[in-house]
Amino acid sequence: HKPRMRFILKPGIFAVLASCSTQAFSFASQRQCPTVFVRGGAKVLSSTTLTSAETSSSSTTMTAYPQLVQKLETITHLERAKAVLSYDQQVFMPSAASAERGAQMAALATVLHQAKTDPILLELMDQALQTGEEKEPLTSDQARLLELERKSFVENARVPSELAAKAASLAASAHATWVQARATSDFAKFANALQDCFDTSMQIATAKQGSSENLYDFMVDEYEMGMTQQRLDAIFAQVEESLVPLIQKVLASDKGPSMDALHGDFAIDQQQKLSERLVKAIGFNVEKGRIDVSVHPFTSSMSPSDVRITSRFRTDDWYQGLAGSLHEAGHAMYEQSLPSSALSLDTYLNMGTHESQSLFWERHIGLSQPFWKYATPLLHEILPNTAKYSAEEIYGAINAVTGQSLIRVEADELTYPLHVILRYNIEKDVIGGKLAVSDIPSRWNADMKRYLNLDVPSDDKGCLQDVHWSALAFGYFPTYLIGAIAAAQLYHYCHKDICDLEDRIARGEFQPIKEWLTDKVHRHGRRYKSLDALLEAQLGEPLNPQYFLEYLNTKYSDLYHL
């Protein structure tokens, strides 16, 4: 029944879905491609590069900035077409079509790579940045777009093609090696490949930034724009200091809620009905999206007018599927509420911000007492075998802490942050030269004992459980906890601005909440340079873990009568 953290699928952030090898390959190969990543797209109708004469001639009828925008928009549309093919592959495509779909995706990837690496893009950016008396000054949005695109283009152009090719190949081979090592619970089988993953990622980061200094800062910035290791160290230390003793008290309590209300025999079609009703109620616009079922829950954005979510269900537990649906709906409503352009300026800010939106709805709404005052009658109607449980009993059941999960994606809300901090500390220490790859298992097991008093019986339940490192996704793990912290901070200020917030939730009035989030987060796209900057401007202070820790302390002290 526990919340699961997921990757989203959309142009510019290539997915790694746990246990889904094709997505792992996609993520790594595209993320490390030398000049791929004009985030959110760019444009080119053919792979032909304009000559200087052609550029000059074209400039007589159109200035550099509009030409650039046309190219960026076209690449975005190609990226979105690729996203449609990928979604179809995940959800609808017949299995016999996999080879043909692979050829289609490869052909489209070639066109996109050529478009994104076209030197004319950089020429047009530089021309647009030139100043003169005859030129109108750039608007703040134009300047920000050029800043984003030029940084991306220049960084990726610094990566030698041989290194980019190695990264793409390594992502495929490392994933296969990881799968084998995990199946046999033998880290030694993966150690050499993992060392290569770390080394290659560090080489790429060095090439992109032109320096080997502060490599982990650069890796984190790839996913969490504007965040640094120093800032993460301070925030995560505060979280660790507060949660370790709280978890110990909770686990020692014999007054926790029962989880009986979650268990039984629940028809999948009825669970789908419940999830769809509640996802629509909180604000997911089905006229601009779809709700489907897949092996791995995910969100895929083709544009703000076409955002699709999937969930999965099990017959013995009704809440897991619903939690996944609410989580993905949070991601999707962010995408649906972004400005409707085809420029990277109007895409999501970073992964921590995206995760804050999914966790806002999954946790601060979907795990709240007011929500279950509203949703319990619907639950009883659709799943009659839950009718004997009150709203209070359901609230307790979905928030119960087991504390015994060795697996990150199965961890409860209270212990999940320590799973993230453990991984963060390990990967930053390897990259910082403080920890050898061969020592990861012993470090992992020691930290699991220190944080949660759990003994790790085997590598598959320890350091081999996540797909991320085999996909060269170093720096991704911290975004999960950043999102949780930001979600609590946003809810705190939302509660201040909407004084009767809990009463509205209990009545099923979610539109004011969605509008508040759109005003504070969604509509800004990537106009701010970091989550800190966005929160400072919109809430009056940067990311602050105080609200997250107060939320957890208050909630679980009450649930467990501490």
Image (cartoon, grey):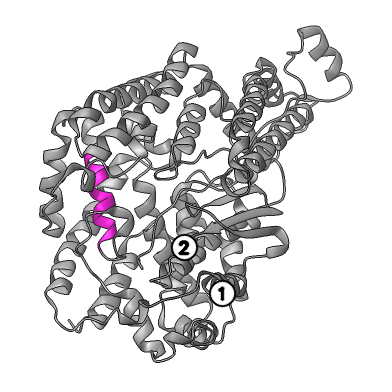
Identity of the residue drawn at 46% across and 11% down: 162
Is residue 230 placed above or below 106 in the rendered structure?
Answer: below
Q: Main secondary structure of the magenta part?
A: helix
Q: Position of residue 316 (x, y in %)?
A: 38, 71
Q: Does residue 337 show up?
A: no
Residue 78: where, in percent of width, then height?
A: 70, 33
Q: Residue furthest front?
A: 96
Q: Which residue position holds label 1?
A: 278
Instruction: Name the element at disc 2.
Output: helix
Q: Viewer-proximal residue, 262 or 31?
A: 262
**Residue segment shown in magenta:** 415-426
Compared to residue 200, the image places residue 541 above or below, namely: below
Residue 250: in sight, yes or no? yes
Tell me: 459 left or right of 78: left
In the image, taking residue 30 as reference, residue 11 lies left or right, namely right
Q: Please give left or right for residue 399 compared with residue 308 in the image.
A: left
Report which residue position mark 2 lands on. 324
Q: Amino acid at mark 1?
A: Leu
The N terminus sits in image quarter: bottom left
Q: Seen from this angle, which residue lies furthest right? A: 61
